[in-house]
Amino acid sequence: MKLLNASLVIAPLALAPAFALPGDLVDEIRVGGSGIIDSKSSKDKGFVGSAEIYLSPFESSQTGVAKVLLEPRVHIGASAGASGTDQIYTGLNWHLPLGETFFAEAGIGGTVHNGNLDTGNGPRLGCRFLFREHVALGVKVTETVSVMATADHSSNANLCDGPNDGITHAGLAIGVKF
């Protein structure tokens, strides 16, 4: 039942950009898969799927590094797995071109999850709302399609009472830009 509930979140996220036209609010969609990197107390296992929508970047008149810093994109996403903790997340994402073909990304935001707070078999996360950071290294396959190696981490940064085991994933994603 847990996977079914998560699919009700991921499906609309994955389908919503199909109704967006180039130049609209949606800049890119991504789907991916990852594995859970276990901490000593984590019992989450297996494959975790994800779907993300990246909104068009902020605009500035800057160039170079200032342009990268002042033009993040807002992202909205969900991740779920049959044996893992499901998450819905949002935040800001910065894109750094590394020449014509390669790029790096970093982002920060927040997530809400359905995992354990202070007891149970999975990671003990301490509170329902967590901070979430992510990084990616990617390659543009075409002008609109890219493939990325990704990693993300969610934890409460010791701001909640209780444990802070955190959740970390590493995997691959495919992005399609509009």
Image: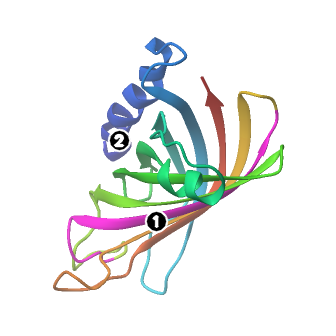
At label 2, counting other C-alpha atoms closer than 10 Å, the crowd grade (few under 14, some 14-19, many 20 or more) is many
Location of the N terminus by quadrant is: top left
Query: Residue at 54% of width from left, 54% of height from top?
Result: 94
At label 1, counting other C-alpha atoms closer than 10 Å, the crowd grade (few under 14, some 14-19, many 20 or more) is many
Query: Residue at 60% of width from left, 55% of height from top?
Result: 34
Query: Residue at 39% of width from left, 76% of height from top?
Result: 166
Above or below for 58 versus 97: above
Above or below for 131 versus 100: below
Circle 2 SS class: helix
Place of residue 174 in the rendered image (x, y in percent of width and height, measured from the top left): 67, 39
Place of residue 76 in the rendered image (x, y in percent of width and height, measured from the top left): 39, 42
Location of the C terminus by quadrant is: top right
Q: Nearer the viewer, residue 168 or 84?
A: 168
Q: Report the Cα–Cα distance between label 2 and label 1.
A: 21 Å
Above or below for 131 versus 94: below
Residue 150 visible to the viewer: no
Q: Nearer the viewer, residue 94 or 31?
A: 94
Left or right: 123 as drawn, with respect to 26: left
Identify the amino acid type marked 1: Glu
Magenta stretch: residue 43 in it? no
Residue 91 visible to the viewer: yes
Place of residue 147 in the rendered image (x, y in percent of width and height, measured from the top left): 73, 43
Numbered label tally: 2
Res 31 → quadrant: top right
Q: Earlier in the sequence, mark 2 or mark 1?
A: 2
* Residue behind mark 1: 133
Residues marked 2 and 1 touching at CB (< 8 Å): no
Left or right: 131 as drawn, with respect to 178: left
Main SS of the magenta segment? Answer: strand
Identify the amino acid type marked 2: Ala
Q: Nearer the viewer, residue 74 or 164?
A: 74
Residue 6's disc number: 2
